[in-house]
Image: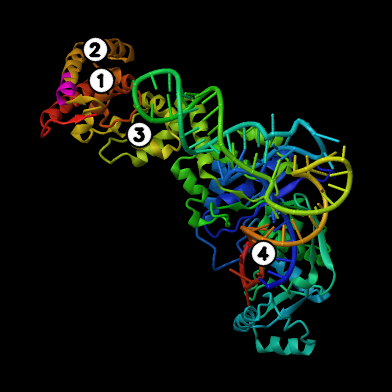
RNA sequence: GCCCCCAUCGUCUAGAGGCCUAGGACACCGGCCUUUCAAGCCGGCAACAUGGAUUCGAAUUCCAUUGGGGGCGCCA
């Protein structure tokens, strides 16, 4: 549904220097949604032109992240495609040829400045409070001098011969008309001395060769766009359309980074965020459907996504809302499905004494009890460990709940124990019909009786509803834990009461 | 320092001149429900950065100021 009939082809072009960051993933998501909405292609291209910073295994982590979130790609490093290869390191000749052509055309030149000279130059510029940038020292070197330098074996890079005058205007889909003065742009490097291209050259060559129609990227690239446009022009390529997405910021309003806590998508995965919640939340950072719709499936996002509704304002990554949304998604899962997703977390976090594999059947009994109490799946072990461990550890005085004392608590437990033993069937209904009247009989409020039992049975004052908990635990374990509680009360040093 | 972008509740946002005494959501605070905790329901708090201009009328247009962000690498 783009104006021109041109097919939508967009790309996600991460550089494999580490774990994929949520900001990056949000960019990937917008590209993916845009592609799917327009029935276009979503391409993954690995920008590994920085040999020093390339991290082992990063590519797989990035691809796994996309898979986990449900973003599929039509062309990419693992599956290939008509415009491959999809690793920039395997496309070096393309960039070198383009750079060479630019030199021949006079749009670029060799530069022999050493890193030391550049450092000194920058230091001087900073000292004089001038904008940093290459001083064009090598721009005018004569042909004979080039030959001499070349023969002497000096290391060299290729720089773009940036026009000294005029301006470069362009129309950003999200921001509208933007104009840069060419005079403010220095002669940036196209080809490094190791023969690898910089981002500027590589992305232009690839985006053209891969027939990318739209570039959706973060706003941090906005000021590089004029350089890219100059390159398109010099190479005689038709530029794609640009859309610069609002940045994702940390709580201190600076560019989201590691010091803001968990930011890599892998961390969210290991903490127990659901991919569907993650997607939904990320989609809403800089995009909205209307004034009220918040919970949307992947399909609804695809159906409704539009660059027209992308905001221009940077967004702070708000964890609290993500947690809330994750809770919503957890509650919307069937109990069976939640069980399935929970098991890996229990397997991972429960103490080693707990027998593996953990019984799916047993977890299925527990899942409904915690489903509406969990926001992040990694919390579940802390919420349910007393179901798996042996006798829970706890302070005896927890057994004496509000307005009770040792005698009352002891009596309540002993009477309960007696009646529990005689219970023909052990389930929620029988427990309730037995325990409620018992409270009255003992002249206790239900909260007092149930609270005492809760501590006895779970070792804590906060737990899922009592009857369900007891049922899941089973008669034997309940009885033995109540017995322990009675003993604990008897062994308490002195009369204490809790008000 | 220079260049560019941005500006509605603490946060995510709706709003494209009268529908706005500015709507929704998270968070927070009350209440209800209730065996604890949650969940749920009901209610509350809370914003158009400032100053000009245009207009009968401006959160919405224009200009300044202020504030915030980003960029300025043989990183991407």
Q: Is residue A407 magenta?
A: yes
Mark 4 belongs to which subunit?
Answer: A
**Mark 1 packing: few (<14 Cα in 10 Å), some, or many (20+)?**
many
Give the total of numbered labels: 4
Q: Looking at the image, tell me whether mark 4 or mark 3 is earlier in sequence order.
A: 4
Viewer-nearest residue: A286 or A112: A286
State whether residue A245 appears in this view.
no
In the displayed structure, A401 sits above or below A179; it is above
The N terminus of chain A, quarter of image: top right
Q: Do callouts 1 and 2 mark residues in contact (Cβ within 8 Å)? A: yes
Q: Where does residue A386 sit, x and y in percent of width and height? A: 28, 32
Question: Could you say which quadrant of the image residue A466 lies in?
Answer: top left
Mark 3 belongs to which subunit?
Answer: A
What residue did someone put label 3 on?
A: A383
Q: Looking at the image, tell me whether mark 2 or mark 4 is earlier in sequence order.
A: 4
What residue did someone put label 2 on?
A: A438
Q: Secondary structure at mark 1?
A: helix
Q: Looking at the image, tell me whether mark 3 or mark 2 is earlier in sequence order.
A: 3
State whether residue A166 appears in this view.
yes
Chain part drawn in magenta: A406-411
Q: CA distance from mark 3 to mark 2?
A: 28 Å
Viewer-nearest residue: A93 or A489: A489
Q: Where does residue A472 sit, x and y in percent of width and height? A: 31, 22
Q: Please give left or right for residue B60 compared with residue A326 in the image.
A: right
Q: Secondary structure at mark 2?
A: helix
Q: Secondary structure at mark 4?
A: helix
Q: Where does residue A432 sit, x and y in percent of width and height? A: 31, 13
In the displayed structure, A104 sits above or below A390; it is below
Q: Looking at the image, tell me whether mark 1 or mark 3 is earlier in sequence order.
A: 3
Q: Secondary structure at mark 3?
A: helix
Q: CA distance from mark 4 to mark 1?
A: 69 Å
């Amino acid at each position: 549904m783009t104006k021109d009939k041109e097919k939508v082809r967009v790309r996600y072009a991460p550089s494999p220097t580490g774990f994929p960051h949520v900001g990056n993933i949000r960019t990937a998501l917008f590209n993916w949604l845009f592609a799917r909405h327009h029935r276009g292609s979503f391409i993954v291209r690995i920008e590994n032109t920085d040999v020093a910073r390339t991290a082992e295994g990063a590519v797989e982590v990035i691809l796994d992240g996309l898979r986990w979130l449900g973003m599929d790609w039509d062309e990419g490093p693992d599956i290939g495609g008509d415009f491959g290869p999809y690793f920039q390191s395997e496309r070096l000749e393309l960039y070198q040829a383009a750079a060479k052509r630019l030199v021949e055309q006079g749009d670029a030149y060799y530069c022999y400045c050493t890193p030391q000279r550049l450092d000194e130059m920058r230091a001087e510029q900073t000292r004089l409070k001038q904008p940093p940038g290459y001083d064009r020292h090598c721009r005018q070197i004569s042909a004979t001098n080039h030959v001499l330098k070349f023969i002497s074996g000096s290391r060299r890079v290729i720089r773009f011969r940036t026009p000294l005058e005029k301006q470069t205007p362009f129309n950003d889909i999200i921001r509208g008309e933007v104009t840069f003065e060419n005079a403010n742009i220095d002669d940036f490097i196209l080809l490094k001395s190791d023969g690898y291209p910089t981002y500027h050259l590589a992305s232009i060559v690839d985006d053209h060769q891969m027939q990318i129609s739209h570039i959706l990227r973060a706003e941090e690239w906005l000021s590089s766009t004029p350089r890219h446009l100059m390159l398109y022009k010099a190479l005689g390529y038709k530029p794609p359309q640009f859309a610069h997405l609002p940045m994702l910021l940390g709580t201190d309003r600076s560019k989201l980074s590691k010091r803001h806590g968990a930011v890599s998508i892998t961390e969210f995965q290991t903490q127990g965020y659901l991919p569907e919640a993650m997607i939904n939340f990320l989609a809403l950072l800089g995009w909205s459907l209307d004034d009220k719709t918040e919970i949307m499936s992947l399909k609804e996002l695809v159906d409704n996504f539009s660059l027209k509704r992308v905001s221009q304002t940077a967004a702070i990554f708000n964890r609290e809302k993500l947690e809330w949304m994750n809770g919503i998604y957890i509650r919307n899962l069937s109990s069976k499905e939640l069980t399935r997703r929970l098991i890996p977390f229990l397997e991972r976090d429960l103490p080693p004494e707990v027998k593996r594999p953990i019984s799916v059947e047993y977890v299925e009994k527990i899942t409904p009890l915690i489903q509406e109490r969990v926001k992040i799946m990694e919390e579940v072990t802390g919420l349910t460990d007393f179901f798996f461990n042996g006798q829970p550890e706890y302070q005896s005085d927890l057994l004496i709940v509000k307005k009770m004392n040792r005698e009352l608590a002891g009596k309540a437990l002993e009477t309960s124990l007696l009646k529990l033993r005689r219970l023909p069937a052990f389930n929620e209904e029988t427990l309730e019909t037995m325990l409620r009247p018992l409270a009255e009989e003992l002249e206790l409020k239900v909260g007092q009786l149930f609270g005492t039992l809760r501590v006895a049975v779970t070792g804590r004052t906060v737990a899922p509803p009592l009857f369900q908990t007891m049922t899941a635990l089973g008669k034997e374990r309940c009885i033995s834990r109540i017995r322990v509680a009675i003993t604990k009360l008897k062994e308490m040093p002195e009369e204490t009461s809790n008000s």
